[in-house]
Amino acid sequence: MTDHDATRLQQCLERLRQGDRAAGGELLAHTCERLRRLAHVMLKGYPRLKRWEETGDVLQNALLRLSRALEAVTPPSLRDYYRLATLQIRRELLDLVRHHFGPHGDAGKHQTGGDDLSGASAPPAYERSDVTHDPGELAAWGEFHRQAAALPAEEQEVFDLLWYQGVTHVEAAAVLGVSAKTVKRRWQAACLKLHDALGGRLPE
């Protein structure tokens, strides 16, 4: 995100506050590509999961969530917009995991290649020695998102901007009104907490 991008997004928010609904579409378009990459990262390497989901499905659902949220509330600042967008992205990614790998999920009712996909008696994904192409790895993503949402507020905000929104340390500092050094410190603290919470096993 360049300074020009930040200025354009802020202008979109101002137009949205003035009742220009087209500005909401521009905000969604800005978020779309980042969300596509996040969904792709979670879903790649899971050929069996493609029975139920494609990256485009996740993308569409999350954008619908964000669109509805923007109809209900207009974020007063770019910082608030990123917070709102990240919340919708995280909810959709978590719902993806719950839908397929929860107690009543589709993945728990089917087998592909003779593998048991229920994970009912399996240990947590981060304790497994071999999770290549294992739906348990997607479940590990679910825990990753839950732990990210549980970070202390300042660290969560920095983590959300850098990881979910893909901005740089300098850009995050401008959005938050702090120094790049502060962003770096909060980012490192957030990553350390996630590492500890997940037993040192981050999703691939």
Image (tube, rainbow, N blue to C red):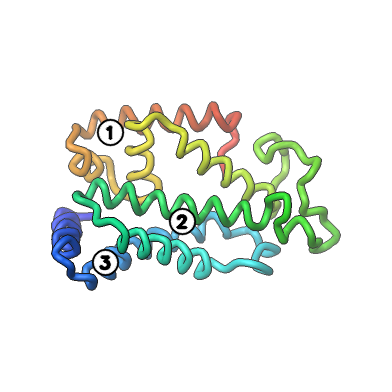
Q: Secondary structure at mark 2?
A: helix
Taking the spot 42% from the left edge, 61% from the top edge, the residue there is 65
Taking the spot 28% from the left edge, 70% from the top edge, the residue there is 25
The amino acid sitting under disc 2 is Leu
- Relative to 134, does residue 48 appear above or below in the rendering? below
The amino acid sitting under disc 3 is Gly
Query: How dense is the environment of label 3, judged by Cα within 10 Å: few (below 14), some, or many (20 and up)?
Result: many
The amino acid sitting under disc 1 is Val
Mark 1 highlights which residue?
Answer: 183
CA–CA distance in space, label 3 to label 2: 21 Å
Taking the spot 28% from the left edge, 33% from the top edge, the residue there is 183
Say whether residue 4 is visible. Answer: no
Mark 2 highlights which residue?
Answer: 38
Taking the spot 16% from the left edge, 56% from the top edge, the residue there is 10
CA–CA distance in space, label 1 to label 2: 21 Å
Q: Earlier in the sequence, mark 1 or mark 2?
A: 2
Residue 31, given in percent of the width and then of the height, sits at 34, 61
Q: Secondary structure at mark 3?
A: helix
Q: Earlier in the sequence, mark 3 or mark 1?
A: 3
Q: Secondary structure at mark 1?
A: helix
Q: Nearer the viewer, mark 3 or mark 2?
A: 3
Query: How dense is the environment of label 1, judged by Cα within 10 Å: few (below 14), some, or many (20 and up)?
Result: many
Say whether residue 117 is visible. Answer: yes
Residue lying farthest front?
72
Mark 3 highlights which residue?
Answer: 24
Left or right position of 196 against 161: right
Q: Nearer the viewer, mark 3 or mark 1?
A: 3
Residue lying farthest bottom?
22
Residue 127, given in percent of the width and then of the height, sits at 69, 34
Residue 1 vs residue 85, the one in the foreground: 85
